[in-house]
Image (cartoon, grey):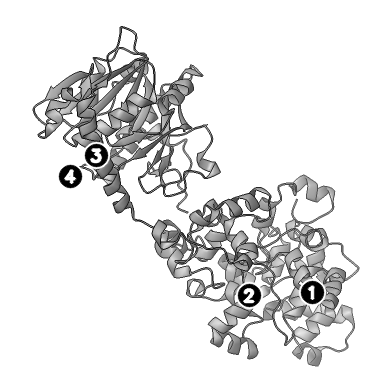
């Protein structure tokens, strides 16, 4: 349980309390606030402590080196308000009165520390007679090499010190020694690979002048406490402007005050998610290099960015692909289309055979409109993908090109032709009456299935009666993920999982339940698809129709499963006009699934 006592009962002289942050240091206090000496009747420790409790608190004085009174008031406005109102004596007083879940100092993050070390439960702290995570860190954690702030790694700090400094740091405690060290007129030591004080002062010479004038204690103090946190980069390898421009969701959380800056997000999430820190570094590409991947698997670095800072920079490893390997998604799409155009004449000589008996393994529904080369390439990959009998139901939605003569290229398909463009949703509904197999595969015509995709989906769907649908790892032509399943948030917004990530990342390479999968490739139990009447005509193509279907599958008592063994390339054609009114579709979806959405997690805009 946290302490809930006034500062006058918690703060004691050194040796009179076991709580590390509650030990009053008279010598430090008088050195930090020399004007106190003129007001004291004597220099006895008890007199100094009494003066702090009676006068120093209201003068914004800190009681010791471990608590920053001014920073705490600024960081927690509600605390500052009650101090100004006179309801409590100081921010430290509020901290003693049950506020130990808050961070006490700009270089220690209490919530971060407790999250990082889940063994520090309330029961464990109480059993060790520890007031909170900060008390543990000061008494044990820093010496054990535990990290209390993303920018202070005690072990890294001590290892870089000169021999005498390392000895003193171990004797006094690394955190205390660092805070004492930066108060001296000496070069600022590094505490982490993720902040470079020497570079920072060269980059921002005005900060160096302000430190010399006593405005700031050191470069780290300025970086963590200045009032314009997005105006400064922490080191040469991270650009705040670049990161926020590339990650609009993060920029929104910064603007709303939910995060201090983009770098705070990057250290907590972005680096692990392989978001690039600057224009010169393609972190996804860097992490995919064999040498880097091997080092990460051997735990030589926590993630790819740390690997570059600790290892890659010294080895002079490239941080982006060479120019000859760089191409845009538009170029990749053009090559995809060109390959399909080359394949089409070959299929004209040897027709694809989809003839079936009475017992097809799977029924494939494909709605097409023009784009014959892409359709044929997709069908060729389908035919090569599964040896068993595949019932192919082609719905021609008002084609005007040679798609009208598709039977010249395909044998045995069930062809349903419409004179007008009825759209992919109505086309799929029309095809459903002709389905004979127990499993129906809804498939786009602008894809290329990777080997074993359909067989993997069939195995997954057949592995448990509770699985209602199986979706695919969808890769765009330039080699990045379109999605690996998707998330539905409480407000009805959706998030394609791992979009723009490498298809090789671990997070996209294990089977798991997901909220939805795209109809680009969606294998569904036929009976369930009929029970749900397929897609809802209230949604336009490309705007929530598959999200709605998967939500209904879940509500019918079945699971939607993402299987990475089901993989394909997706052309990503331009959506038809008027098909992607996302805001309207989200509103319709929210009204339809209001009760179900209340159980969903709140959106994470990071």
- 10 Å neighbourhood of mark 1: few (<14), some, or many (≥20)? some
Q: Which structural element holds mark 4?
A: loop
State the residue in front, 50 or 171: 171
Is the residue under label 4 in contact with that under label 1 (CB below 8 Å)? no
- Could you tell me how far apart the alpha carbons at marks 3 and 4 are, in whole angstroms? 29 Å
Q: What mark, if any, has residue 220 been given in the picture?
A: 2
Establish if 598 lies above or below 190. above
Q: Quadrant of residue 303?
A: bottom right
Q: Sequence order check: which comes first, mark 4 or mark 2?
A: 2
Q: Quadrant of residue 380?
A: top left
Is the residue under label 2 in contact with that under label 4 (CB below 8 Å)? no
Is the residue under label 1 in contact with that under label 2 (CB below 8 Å)? no
Is the residue under label 4 in contact with that under label 3 (CB below 8 Å)? no
Residue at x 42%, y 49% (from the top left corner): 500
User: Which residue is label 4 attached to?
Assistant: 577
User: Which residue is label 1 attached to?
Assistant: 177
- Could you tell me how far apart the alpha carbons at marks 1 and 3 are, in whole angstroms? 69 Å
Q: Is residue 367 left or right of residue 70?
A: left
Residue 39's x, y, as percent?
79, 90
């Amino acid at each position: 349980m946290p302490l809930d006592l006034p500062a006058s009962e918690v703060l004691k002289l050194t040796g009179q309390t076991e709580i590390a942050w509650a030990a009053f240091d008279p010598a430090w206090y008088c050195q930090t606030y020399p004007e106190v000496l003129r007001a004291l009747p004597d220099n006895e420790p008890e007199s100094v402590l009494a003066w702090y409790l009676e006068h120093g608190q209201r003068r914004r004085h800190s009681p010791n080196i471990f608590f920053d009174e001014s920073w705490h008031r600024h960081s927690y406005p509600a605390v500052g308000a009650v101090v100004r109102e006179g309801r409590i004596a100081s921010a430290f007083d509020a901290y003693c009165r049950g506020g130990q879940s808050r961070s006490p100092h700009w270089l220690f993050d209490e919530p971060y520390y407790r999250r990082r070390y889940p063994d520090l439960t309330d029961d464990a702290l109480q059993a060790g007679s520890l007031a909170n995570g900060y008390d543990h860190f000061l008494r044990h954690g820093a010496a054990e090499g535990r990290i209390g702030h993303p920018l202070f790694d005690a072990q890294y700090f001590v290892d870089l010190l000169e021999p005498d400094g390392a000895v003193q740091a171990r004797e006094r405690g690394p955190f205390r020694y660092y805070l004492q060290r930066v108060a001296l007129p000496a070069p600022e030591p590094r505490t982490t690979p993720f902040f470079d004080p020497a570079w920072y002062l060269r980059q921002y010479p005005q900060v160096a002048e302000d430190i010399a004038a006593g405005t700031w204690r050191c470069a780290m103090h300025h970086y963590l406490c200045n009032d314009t946190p997005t105006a400064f980069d922490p080191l040469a390898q991270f650009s705040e402007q670049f990161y926020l421009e590339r990650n609009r969701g993060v920029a929104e959380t910064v603007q709303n005050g939910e995060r201090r800056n983009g770098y705070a997000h990057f250290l907590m999430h972005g680096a692990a998610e392989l978001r690039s820190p600057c224009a010169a570094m393609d972190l996804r590409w860097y992490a995919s290099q064999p040498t880097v991947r091997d080092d990460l698997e051997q735990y030589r670095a926590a993630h790819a960015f740390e690997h570059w800072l600790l290892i890659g920079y010294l080895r002079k490893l490239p941080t982006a692909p060479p120019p000859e390997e760089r191409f845009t998604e538009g170029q990749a799409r053009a090559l995809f289309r060109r390959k399909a155009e080359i394949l089409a004449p070959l299929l004209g000589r040897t027709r694809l055979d989809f003839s079936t008996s009475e017992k097809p393994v799977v029924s494939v529904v494909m709605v097409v409109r023009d784009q014959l080369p892409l359709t044929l390439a997709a069908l060729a990959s389908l035919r090569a993908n599964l040896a068993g009998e595949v019932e192919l139901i082609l719905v021609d939605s008002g084609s005007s090109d040679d798609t009208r003569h598709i039977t010249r290229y395909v044998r045995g398909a069930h062809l349903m032709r419409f004179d007008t463009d009825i759209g992919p949703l109505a086309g799929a509904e029309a095809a459903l009456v002709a389905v004979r197999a127990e499993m129906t595969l809804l498939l786009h015509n602008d894809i290329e299935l990777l080997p074993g995709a359909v067989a993997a989906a069939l195995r997954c769907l057949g592995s448990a009666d509770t699985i209602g649908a199986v979706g695919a790892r969808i890769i765009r032509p330039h080699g990045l993920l379109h999605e690996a399943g998707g998330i539905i948030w409480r407000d009805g917004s959706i998030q394609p999982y791992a979009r723009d990530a490498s298809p090789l990342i671990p997070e996209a390479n294990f089977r798991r339940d997901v909220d939805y999968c795209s109809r680009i490739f969606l294998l569904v139990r036929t009976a369930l698809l009929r029970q749900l009447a397929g897609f809802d005509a209230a949604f336009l193509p490309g705007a929530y129709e598959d999200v709605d279907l998967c939500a209904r599958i879940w509500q019918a008592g079945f699971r939607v499963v993402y299987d990475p063994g089901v993989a394909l390339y997706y052309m990503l054609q331009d959506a038809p006009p008027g098909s992607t009114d996302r805001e309207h579709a989200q509103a319709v979806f929210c009204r339809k699934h209001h009760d179900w959405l209340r159980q969903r997690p709140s959106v994470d805009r990071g």
